[in-house]
Image (cartoon, rainbow, N blue to C red):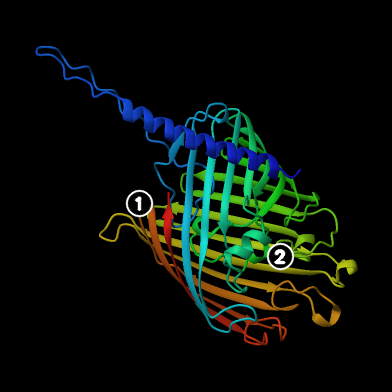
Amino acid sequence: MTCYPTMLALAAAAAAAAAAVVVLAGGAWADEQTPSPPAPNQAAPPAAPPAAAPSPPPFPAMAGALTANPGPTTFDLGLLGKKVTVTGAVTGFGQWQDNVSPGDHDAQLDVSNAQIFINKSDGLIQYFLEVGAYSLPAIGTPYIPASRATRDFYGVLPQGFLKIAPTASFSIEAGALPTLAGAEDTFSFENMNIERGLLWNQENAVNRGVQVNYAMGPVAFSASLNDGYYSGRYSWLSGSATWTIDKTNTLELVATGNTAHTDISTVATLLFQNNQQLYNIIYTHTQGPWTIEPYFQYTHVPRIPGIGALQAASTYGGALLVSYAFAKSKLAGFSVPVRMEFIASTGAVANGAPNLLYGAGSKAWSITVTPTYQYRIYFIRAELSYVGTSGATAGSVFGPTGAATSQTRALLETGLLF
């Protein structure tokens, strides 16, 4: 099922073809003769109508305060596509935090994204390729530098898939796909906040597998057979139904889970979460300068003694994501996203319940504020986040001994989305 060799070859071919197009186009422009002005009393030829501006590509998703380049570069790559867009994200950030966990740092600088996106989004055969390095900063967890994150999570081709779309309402995708779960996406530039949240820490991010999509009027359905938390075992089933109520309101229901028990444990494959079921209810309201997105999440890990889950356990929580954009004022380009969350886990350490948070039966809450400014393809944003906990198991929280019950972070991210 893994599509990496094919997709890497396609990425290389697309990049080479794009370079050839640029070189050939440059040579043609250099050799082109300047047209002579019309003779006296001879009417000038009518001006050609302006070409339609290209639209932002559909992938990667951009549901946050930042917006994709509205005029992406488009290439004619022949057999690989007549309208292939090439965009990208080059971003870096600095971070300071208190109550530093072992192996982490109180202050650090790093690349958060150095990626190129290749989209063919028309015709029967479509594809998307995402190539490059990235980090996945998330509140409440130690930071993993981009060099290690790229190697240990999803490699230099974190997302890439082939899409067959025989009609506008039906399509099939296969490859490394973005998850259907949750309201936040995988990479920092896609989201309202730099760091992903506490609920995101329970969700998977990239699924290798096959997905079917079907739209019927205002309702869109997706169903997927995949490997869950990047486990390589294709035993997960995922489904979503999205109802576009009107132009400002949508409601989404998500259900996903493992149909088998697996004992795989890696940086990307969390042992207990890879054996769970997860459910979301996500509501989105967008009107004028406001984006308001509350969502609820429930997860459940059954009793599986073979992986150390001697008692079943669950998490339940909710989040509220709000963003206000100063679109029509002297502050045009500025926006202020805010995220508030609460999550709790069930079970008891004494009964052998799995640790799904900061110890069995622990609770956590957070608030994150991310003032943002974007000018064309350039942006800069700051962030302040706070995570508090209760009922945590000593050694499972923050600080050098894992006994601190809270953590505060300050971040600054800047870059361009070309």
Q: Which residue is mark 1?
A: 376
Q: Earlier in the sequence, mark 1 or mark 2?
A: 2
Residue depicted at 85% across the width and 59% down the height: 261
Residue depicted at 75% across the width and 77% down the height: 360
Label 2 is placed on what type of residue? Val
Outermost residue toward the left in this view: 40
**Image location (x, y in percent) of residue 297:** 65, 62
| Left or right placement of residue 304 versus residue 90 in this view | right
Q: Which residue is mark 2?
A: 267
The 10 Å Cα crowd at callout 1, few under 14, some 14 to 19, many 20 or more, is some
Q: Nearer the viewer, residue 216 or 95?
A: 95
**Image location (x, y in percent) of residue 253:** 64, 51
Vertical side of 44 occupied by 305: above or below = below
**Residue 120 visible to an observer of this rendering:** no
Quadrant for the N terminus, please: top right
Outermost residue toward the top in this view: 41
**Quarter where residue 168 is shown:** top right
How many numbered circles are shown?
2
The 10 Å Cα crowd at callout 2, few under 14, some 14 to 19, many 20 or more, is few
**Image location (x, y in percent) of residue 238:** 72, 49
